[in-house]
């Protein structure tokens, strides 16, 4: 592995988005007590999330024998593209961040098969009205969205 110099950070102090929406700015506190701002272009955020996830997986493999990094999901929603059959699964976690995962129809059906094996094929969706996840969208149950 090549030697790479870097700045050790202890704490993410805050984040902001630039007024034009083109960058996410992260303000870090270094181990030396200095503040460092890093601006990430909007179109590169997903790539950086992927790289951080790969790095986190590698550190967990080294330190804890390969256990995956986990984050508790606080909400989710889903939609299927009727033309392609692709499933878009959006997960909300942490302080309210969301990530949307795009599944092929084959992968979505494999996920359904896996969930049914864990919870039973006869598992019934929750009923009732839940908080809206956006303007004009009524949450019928987690993951079941009815657009008005």
Image (spheres, grey):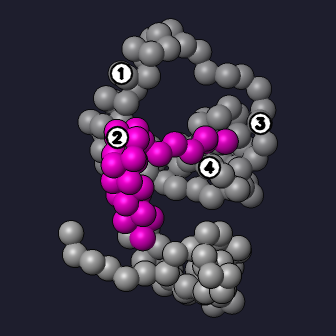
Q: Earlier in the sequence, mark 1 or mark 3?
A: 1
Q: Earlier in the sequence, mark 3 or mark 4?
A: 4
Residue corresponding to mark 2: 66
Residue corresponding to mark 4: 92
Residue at x 44%, y 22% (from the top left corner): 115
Dot 1, how many residues are within 10 Å of its Cα: few (below 14), some (14-19), or many (20+)? few
Q: Earlier in the sequence, mark 4 or mark 1?
A: 4
From the image, give the main secondary structure of the stretch colored magenta.
Answer: helix
Residue at x 37%, y 82% (from the top left corner): 5
Question: From mark 2 to mark 3, how far is it between C-alphas?
Answer: 37 Å
Q: Is residue 81 magenta?
A: no
For this view, does 29 lie left or right of residue 120?
Answer: right
Residue 23 seen anywhere in this rendered image of the structure:
no
Quarter of the image for residue 24 reads: bottom right
Q: Which mark is residue 113?
A: 1
Residue at x 51%, y 42% (from the top left corner): 70
Q: Earlier in the sequence, mark 2 or mark 3?
A: 2
Q: Which mark is residue 130?
A: 3
The answer to the question of whether label 2 and label 1 lie on touching residues, with beta carbons closer than 8 A, is no
Q: Which segment did they paint magenta?
A: 48-74
Work out which residue is located at the far left of the displayed protein and give it.
1
Q: Nearer the viewer, mark 2 or mark 3?
A: 2
For this view, does 138 lie left or right of residue 2?
Answer: right
Q: Nearer the viewer, mark 2 or mark 4?
A: 2
Question: From mark 2 to mark 1, how far is it between C-alphas?
Answer: 25 Å
Q: Nearer the viewer, mark 3 or mark 4?
A: 4
């Amino acid at each position: 592995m090549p030697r790479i110099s870097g700045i050790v950070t202890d704490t993410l102090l805050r984040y902001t988005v630039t007024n034009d929406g083109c960058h996410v700015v992260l303000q870090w506190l270094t181990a030396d007590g200095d503040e460092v701002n890093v601006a990430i272009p909007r179109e590169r955020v997903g790539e950086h999330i992927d790289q951080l996830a790969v790095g986190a997986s590698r550190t967990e493999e080294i330190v804890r024998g390969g256990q995956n990094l986990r984050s508790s999901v606080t909400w989710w929603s889903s939609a299927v593209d009727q033309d392609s059959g692709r499933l878009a699964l959006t997960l909300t976690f942490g302080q309210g961040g969301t990530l949307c995962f795009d599944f092929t129809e084959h992968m979505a059906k494999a996920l359904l098969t896996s969930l049914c094996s864990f919870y039973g094929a006869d598992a019934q969706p929750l009923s009732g009205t839940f908080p809206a996840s956006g303007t004009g969208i009524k949450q019928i149950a987690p993951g079941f969205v009815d657009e008005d």
